[in-house]
Image: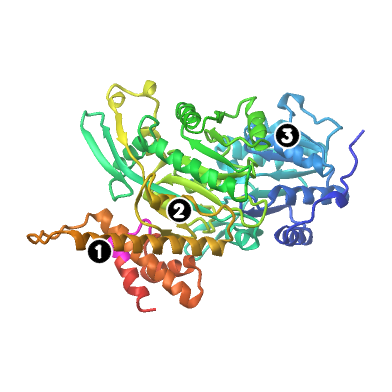
Amino acid sequence: MSPPVPNLEIFPPLRDWQRKAMVTYLRRRSEDFMAVATPGAGKTTFALRIAAEMIADGTCDAVTVVCPTEHLKTQWAHAAARVGIQLDPKFRNSDVHSSRDFHGAVLTYAQVGMAPAVHKRRTITRRTFVILDEIHHAGDSRTWGDGVKDAFEPAVRRLLLTGTPFRSDENPIPFVAYERGQDGVQRSRADSVYGYADALRDGVVRPVLFMAYSGETRWRTNAGDELAARLGEPMTKDLIAQAWRTALDHRGEWMPQVMRAADARLTKIREHGMPDAGGLVIASDQTAARAYAKLLRDLTGEPATVVLSDDEGASGRIAEFANSEQRWMVAVRMVSEGVDIPRLAVGVYATSASTPLYFAQAIGRFVRARREGETATVFLPSVPHLLGLASEMEAQRNHVLGAPKEKDGLEDSLLERAQKAEDALGDLDKKFEALSAVAELDQVIYDGTSFGMAARTGSAEEADYLGLPGLLTPDQVTTLLNKRQTEQMAAQKRQQQEQAKTEVPAQREPVVTMSAGERRATLRRQLNTLVAAHHHRTNLPHGKIHAELRRLCGGPPSAQATIEQLEERIATIQTF
């Protein structure tokens, strides 16, 4: 016996963007419809409501959902069951046909790629509505993309969902519409867009503060040379990769110091408005994940949940953590996308993955808001490329085909080589050795603006930022960060004046030339102070002022700008 038609009356009320998108969908009735919505905005609810409408009006008899991971199959099936749509998450390719007890099945892209003919037969047998969740994954490999296209070409309707509609390659994504611009470049076209900035304005997602930590690192190269570098200062990609790897080494001091700061932030959030707040450490590999879990246990006295891969027990461990009040989870990519743990409020980005796609997916785990005023805080290395991604969190991106290749940041392949396990390395690479690393709070990034000055871990200056209230509106976040920065700069000035009074006059000391890193930090603070002053005069958001300066002067976000670019922006804003 077939399951009953879903009851539209039991669906939760739709948000404004969901209702507008549904009206657009029902009016067009096109075969393909792509909805882009920021993580946490409610893509699942929207898609299931459309599916229920299609079944109720007789357009479709069956529903197929395709998603990236095994865990998400279970998550989709549970969400669908709550609104009367029965989906089989255990369907295997060898089953050939879905049981009549279900409206359809939930599959992974890999599963479809292995046997597209099986799923094409299922699609032809019943009038099928297909939901392609995080559709950009269909471009992960030629097999997956061809399999999805072949299997679901006969579908009556296809709904494409994504929170990150862009990729770092040029593999075309099946069923996505591309439009050629005047520059000759093809860009993906969405039928409905609901970005992070829109969701933040509506209170659907949390404001995210990025706490970037720099610090001195030392390592021994495969040639036996000892090198030292400071995270956040200009250097070659190779040196950045090695310094980054050294900082993330659990045997140094950088990771314990950053985790201690992250746990202090988690405690503050739990004490002020989010008693069940949880934290997530995103690791590069299984060895690092286990080591980080041990560090957290030593630090907090509580065991951390460890999710190493998309194995049989991973879904259960994630679900158990999501429904508990446990403090920390450590994972390797497993929870980078789609996994719903609304209580996550603090993150540590301890991975070498650096593409915009992966970064956006990872940060998406922390943005879902449950009540007004909730905030999220993500701790990350002070690496220029990551700082740029953090500064551009609100930027809208599309998948681009045929664009000129631009090296705008670190390449994952370079970092992956730096992160190889020792047993897979050659004789020379085995000699790489991380010697030491210490952490220092470099800056706080919010709404595209950098706040704060360098502060040692454990200092009162660092505690001022870690102790921000757990419940704040976006405007309150900006106001408090400006206040903290002003107080920090005033305290430093008073300290310098006191030192000048107590010092015994002596021979004139030669003028000490600042390093490039110190000069850039000083200019960033000066620029941010001028932007804040312009904000108070005009009430324009900080991000819009920075965007206008970039439009007029050119160049990357301030976290990546050169000394000359920062000086030009300072001169420009002084003319506003």
Task: List x then y, in percent, for residue 376.
Answer: 55, 50
Please provide the residue range marked out in magenta.
558-566
Residue 121: image x %, image y %?
76, 34
- Within-10-Å neighbours for mark 3: few <14, some 14–19, many 20+: many
- The colour scheme applied to this rendered structure is rainbow
**Above or below, 260 relative to 306:** below
Q: Earlier in the sequence, mark 2 or mark 3?
A: 3
Kind of residue indicated by mark 3? His
Res. 414 in view: yes
Write down the residue under mark 1. 497
Question: Label 1 amino acid?
Answer: Gln
Taking the image as shown, residue 559 lies to the left or right of residue 359, namely left
Circle 3 sits on which residue? 119
Label count reads 3
Secondary structure under the numbered disc 2 in the rendered image = helix
Q: Disc 2 and disc 1: Cα gap in Å?
A: 24 Å
Determine if the magenta segment contains residue 561: yes
User: Percent x, y for residue 427?
Assistant: 29, 21
Q: Earlier in the sequence, mark 3 or mark 1?
A: 3
